[in-house]
Amino acid sequence: MVRFLARRLLNYIALCLLATFLAYALASLTFRPLDQLSMRQPPPPAATIEAKRVELHLDKPIPERFGIWISGVARGDFGKTVASASINDELWRRVGISLRLFLAGTVIGIVAGVLLGVTAAIKQYSIFDHVGTLFSFLVLSTPVFVIGTLLKVAWLPVNQAAGTQLLYFNGESTAGFSGTGWDLVVDHLQHLVLPTIAIAIGQVAVYSRYQRSAMLDVLGSDFLRTARAKGLTRRQALFKHGLRTALIPMATLFAFGFGLLVTGGVFTERIFGWFGMGDWLLVGVQNQDANITATVTLFIAVLVLFAGWLSDVLYAALDPRVRVR
Amino acid sequence: MSETLSQPAKAAAPEAAIPVTRPVRVSRGRLVARRLRRNRLGLAGAAFIVLLFIGAFVSPLFYPWDYRTQDDLALLLPPSPTHWFGTTSLGEDLFAQCMRGLQKSLLIGLLVGVISTGLAAVVGSLAGYFGRATDRGLMWLVDLLLVLPSFLIVAILSPAFRGKSWLLLVLLLSAFNWMISSRIVRGMTLTLREREFVAAARFMDMAAWRIITRHIIPNMASILIIDATIGVAGAILSETALSFFGFGIQPPDVSLGTLISSGTESALTFPWLFDFPAGLLVLTVLAVNFFGDGLRDALDPSACRARGRQGANSGEKRP
């Protein structure tokens, strides 16, 4: 088991490196970072442009440039932006902001999605079930940027009625906020709620639909009847035997669902004005900056593969048949 | 149900030699159409899609305003009989723009859905049929591409196709949308490969590509059709998402994504600028999803039980 997971981990590291190289190479091929400089008015002297070219290693072939960058990363230095600012200075703050959003979104999305799906399956064809199905369809057809804007529009009257800012739409904390301790936590929470709902609602829709069908499969199975026959109550049988089995396919889905979450995160950060990694990706593309783009790609690749690895572990934890091998 | 009863009756008929009531032969096409007709939501989705196509491609012929016309005397007007969806801050008619955007979104969605499903079918069946190194290589490629969200790759490549045809966007979207389906196709090929008719074809020395195109892919047709339909919905969402950030359709052309993007800032002050394009987008994708779901129930009734949809065709369950 440990060897299996270790081998998977090794494969993941290789995939991570290759994915980052792919993004770096594509970015280096399409971006023209010198345009910003050469189109400045008045045009800078040719020597300045040439110096920038050398500074950005544009005179070297792409694999060599990547080699320079990745060996820097191995030493903990993510390089410089086109504007010669250090990426490290901004990186960890942005990583923290994005992770806060992703973690809150995943946890709420999975817990709510699983609960919703299980309830819908137990009460099949009830009003709750039909409303739940309709809700999932509607959410799955609505892009995150529409959901985010709708949340803002819907919440504004509540804020106005309350007379104060109960929840904030912009930023991840109040600029220049000087409170400490509990006040700081409350301030962060006030900013966190709406973006988390925006990102989690799609997850709820996906997980609840799959959980519902997985649970329905289990509900008709023999082992559940056996569990009742040996004297368990319906609730005990459903949660101890039914839910655990129905959760197994969810472990696989988790790896895919996480990719969806990361893409959704880019939109959520933009709409709610969070300066996280997703926002940075857009900045990187706009500034034609290969280093920023590659750094964000590495971050996303590590997250997606970590989710994949976690789903393997969860699978093994939930399904004893896997552990035997 | 006559459709399920027909088989045993047919088998018994020649032996008994007694003229039993002749079973009605129902072709698969009619069977699917009949099942589809029973699914109200799927039918409503299909009707709405037809309506959208007509609206998007026919309405510009008679609607008085063009999507490019800028009327300085009609800035930011709310919806009215002359301007059905109102006007923008530049005096452009929003209905004409929405229809133009809808044209783009529908075409891109349809093309990407078909192309990426085709790609998935080819890659998946090759990997599944040949196995060994081909399988490992192709599935590793799939893993690699799944690590990178397609949004990220297309965003990185977007500066390269700025000012070029929107067909390039179609190719890019298709190139990064086939991975998950190809895994499903591979799994199905693995089982199909062991079936008798494939073995027979192999013993007859049939070329591998002929076996794949003649025997493997036709046997997955229903799954592929369903997948393409669901893919259309996904492609429309990807396209609008990219256009929302200015990575997809470029001005002066419009797509629902660019319209929503410019409407987002004024969602509170001039709500129609956001409401109409966003509503249209959600309804379009919803219709495609309902149709895809109905199609799945009609083409692949065995999936109904797994998804707990016994109600959709309970008549066939117990003959």
Image: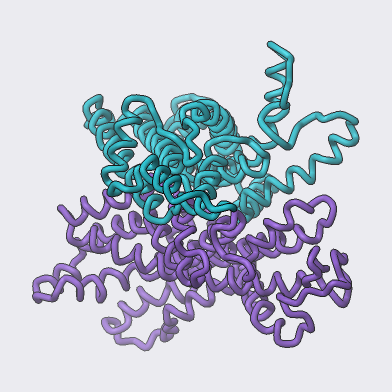
Chain colours: A cyan, B purple
Which residue occupies 26% across, 61% down? B189
Q: How many marks?
A: 0
Task: Answer with the quarter of the image where residue B204 lies.
Answer: bottom left
One can see residue A21 in this view: yes
Q: Is residue B6 above or below residue A295?
A: below
Say which of A94 and B85 sits in front. Answer: A94
Say which of B227 and A18 sits in front. Answer: A18
Which residue occupies 32% across, 44% down? A21
One can see residue B313 in this view: no
User: Residue B275: x, y in percent?
Assistant: 76, 59
Residue lying furthest top in this view?
A181
User: Residue B47: x, y in percent?
Assistant: 64, 75
Say which of B211 and A30 sits in front. Answer: A30
| B56 displayed left or right of B148 | right
Which residue occupies 90% across, 31% down? A163
Task: Answer with the quarter of the image where residue A32 lies.
Answer: bottom left
| B230 displayed left or right of B199 | right
Which residue occupies 51% across, 32% down? A238
